Image (cartoon, rainbow, N blue to C red):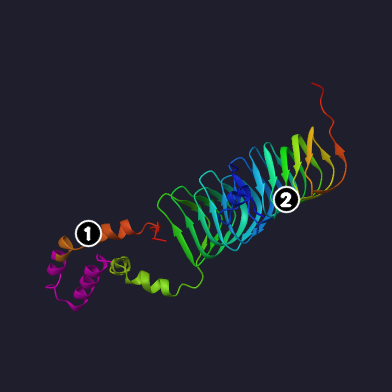
Amino acid sequence: MANPKDSSISSGDSTVIGESIVINGKLTGDEDLTVRGRLEGELSLTKTLIVEASGVVKANVEVKNAVVSGAVVGNIDAGESVELTKEGRMVGDIRSPRVILVDGASLRGRIDMGEVKGERSEKGARPVRAVRSVPVPARPAARIGKSKLEGKPSPPPPPSESRSGAPVPPLVAAGSRRRVVVKKKAR
Amino acid sequence: MANTVIGSSIVIDGEISGDEDLVIQGTVKGKISVKESLIVDRSGVVEADIETQNVEVSGKVTGNINATDKVELKSDCRVIGDIKAPRILIADGASFKGNVDMDVKEP
């Protein structure tokens, strides 16, 4: 039945919207969708949406996975993950258990990753939290305060020694790690 | 060959326009206007008015087709609607109901 032309066209179960194509309306489906053109309206897929660099999606999106390298204006509700690559631009809210923002991606909107359970403990294991939770300059000050109340002038010198050595590098580290950029994980 | 493919499980309700070839394996309702070719595959279902240069139908089309060059109805297609094009080909086995207008421009 299937002639060679048909088989070449339907190779791989995926839909491509080419660069010059504009779709206005509602799109639903159960397969991967690659957008290189323009899509406005509503979009719901049970699989992956890929918005390529030339693609523009102005729609509320419901998908399983989304990879955005182009522009999205609207909210994305993903069952599994949303990734904004370094060329990705988005205005709208993201709701997904996994959200990946690569350095260079731009986003204006809110991110809702649902109830953060396992991920929090993973992040807590990182050194970032440890550095932040130890505000180094505060300790010597507290000690000074206590020592003044207790009327013992001897403790202050040791903290000042530790000040010269320890505080500076952690401060730099804390600042540099405070960026909102979440590094891309291997998919 | 074609850049844009609407896959078999995709349903579009609205308007599609563009300057390139479009292959439809899924369902499109509304309106289609592309500059180049439109191919409605065997699994494709179109309930829309179509404006394009070339159309090749192997699936189902309900709606009017307006082509500037050619309309080809392949053997398994089912088309309901009016066709307006300078060249219209209907293959053996195709089913078609509607008017045909081959108002050829004078050379």
Q: CA distance from mark 1 to mark 2?
A: 58 Å
Of A133 and A179, nearer the camera is: A179
A158 drawn magenta: yes
The image quadrant of residue B88 is: top right
Question: Are discs 1 and 2 located on one and the same chain?
Answer: no
Q: Residues within 10 Å of mark 2 (few under 14, many from 20)?
A: some
Q: Residue at x 62, y 57 (%)?
A: A60
Q: Position of residue A146 (x, y in %)?
A: 22, 75
Q: Chain of mark 2?
A: B
Residue B68 shows which numbered tag?
none
B102 drawn magenta: no
Q: Position of residue B89 (x, y in %)?
A: 78, 39
Q: Mostly what secondary structure, the magenta segment?
A: helix
Q: Position of residue B48 (x, y in %)?
A: 77, 48
Q: Residue at x 42, y 54 (%)?
A: A102
Q: Residue at x 75, y 41 (%)?
A: B72
For the residue marked with disc 1, what is the amino acid?
Pro
For the residue marked with disc 2, what is the amino acid?
Gly
Compared across the picture, whether A111 is left or right of A42 comes to left
Of B9 and A176, nearer the camera is: B9
Disc 1: which residue = A169
Above or below for A21 versus A60: above
Element type where label 2 sits in the image: strand
Residue B14 shows which numbered tag?
2
Residue extent of the magenta highlight: A135-161
Q: Chain of mark 1?
A: A
